[in-house]
Image (tube, rainbow, N blue to C red):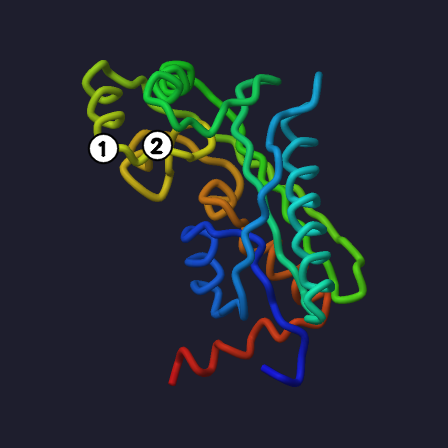
């Protein structure tokens, strides 16, 4: 790893790390970025996802530079929206219940912004939009899902890679984007910065 810059994932999300690992990539370091995720007045969901991803990436890149560590920083943020309405990442059950009732039987969109910041400080971004529709959720569906706790801290109050995957009747776009890191677009950004994205593929096959 000494012959290239370090790859830093600006997230503590086990889901994003697992997705990178799925693509044969192991970050050298995890450096979660703590930013205020409150939408600005009138801010649209797609702009929020991109803005937060770039803020996270640039914040961690600055921390890496201050530590004297040449780093390629990868950051992402996911926003769930119904129309222009941005849904929270609930920590309280009442918030999660409101999200599920809103999503029940209707379409919504998931926007995931990605930002890669080079060792020279250049930021490149991509926005991935996925459209989904939930089945109509029964009272028992909602109560049981709330009881399982899987929703906590997840955009829109659900985790598609878990039990809530059974709620989805239609998906158009990037499944991995809904999980939290759209792999095709992420790999393209990393490859564009010269990162050896296929280096771990042979090791995996061995």
User: Residue 165, how many percent across, how many down?
Assistant: 33, 37
Q: Residue at 64% x, 44% y: name it.
A: 53
CA distance separating discs 2 and 1: 8 Å
The vertical placement of 54 against 201, above or below, is above
Q: Nearer the viewer, residue 57 or 76?
A: 57
The vertical placement of 82 against 168, above or below, is above
Q: Nearer the viewer, residue 166 or 30?
A: 30
Q: Residue at 68% x, 56% y: name it.
A: 116
Q: Residue at 71% x, 70% y: name it.
A: 68
User: Residue 105, how many percent across, how many down?
Assistant: 37, 17
Q: Are marks 2 and 1 in contact (CB under 8 Å)?
A: yes
The vertical placement of 180 against 152, above or below, is below
How many numbered callouts? 2
User: Residue 93, how many percent across, how many down?
Assistant: 32, 21
The vertical placement of 94 against 184, above or below, is above
Residue under label 1: 148
Drawn side of residue 42 relative to residue 38, left or right = right
SS for callout 1: helix
User: Among all residues in the image, which is located at the extreme front?
Assistant: 67
Label number found at residue 175: none
Q: For the N terminus, give its image quadrant.
A: bottom right
Drawn side of residue 81 relative to residue 66, left or right = left
**Residue 147 occupies quadrant:** top left
Other-residue count near label 1 (Cα within 10 Å), few / some / many at <14 / 14–19 / ≥20: few
Residue under label 2: 151
User: Residue 26, how many percent across, how many down?
Assistant: 49, 69
Q: Nearer the viewer, residue 22 or 135?
A: 22
Q: For the C terminus, give its image quadrant.
A: bottom left
SS for callout 2: loop
**Residue 3 occupies quadrant:** bottom right
Other-residue count near label 2 (Cα within 10 Å), few / some / many at <14 / 14–19 / ≥20: many
């Amino acid at each position: 790893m000494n012959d290239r810059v370090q790859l830093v994932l600006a997230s503590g999300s086990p889901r994003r790390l697992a997705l990178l690992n799925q693509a044969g990539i192991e970050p050298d370091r995890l450096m979660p970025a703590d930013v205020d995720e409150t939408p600005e007045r009138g801010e649209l969901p797609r702009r929020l996802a991109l803005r937060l991803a770039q803020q996270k990436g640039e914040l961690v890149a600055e921390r890496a530079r201050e530590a004297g560590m040449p780093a390629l920083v990868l950051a992402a943020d996911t926003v769930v929206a119904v129309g222009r309405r941005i849904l929270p990442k609930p920590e309280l059950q009442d918030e999660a219940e409101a999200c599920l009732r809103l999503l029940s039987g209707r379409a919504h969109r998931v926007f995931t912004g990605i930002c890669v910041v080079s060792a020279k400080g250049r930021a490149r971004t991509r926005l991935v939009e996925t459209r989904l529709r939930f089945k109509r959720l029964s009272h028992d569906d909602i109560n049981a899902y709330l009881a399982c706790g899987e929703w906590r801290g997840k955009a829109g109050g659900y985790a598609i890679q878990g039990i809530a995957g059974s709620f989805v009747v239609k998906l158009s776009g990037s499944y991995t984007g809904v999980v939290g890191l759209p792999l095709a677009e992420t790999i393209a950004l990393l490859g564009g910065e010269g990162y050896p994205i296929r280096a771990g593929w042979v090791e995996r096959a061995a």
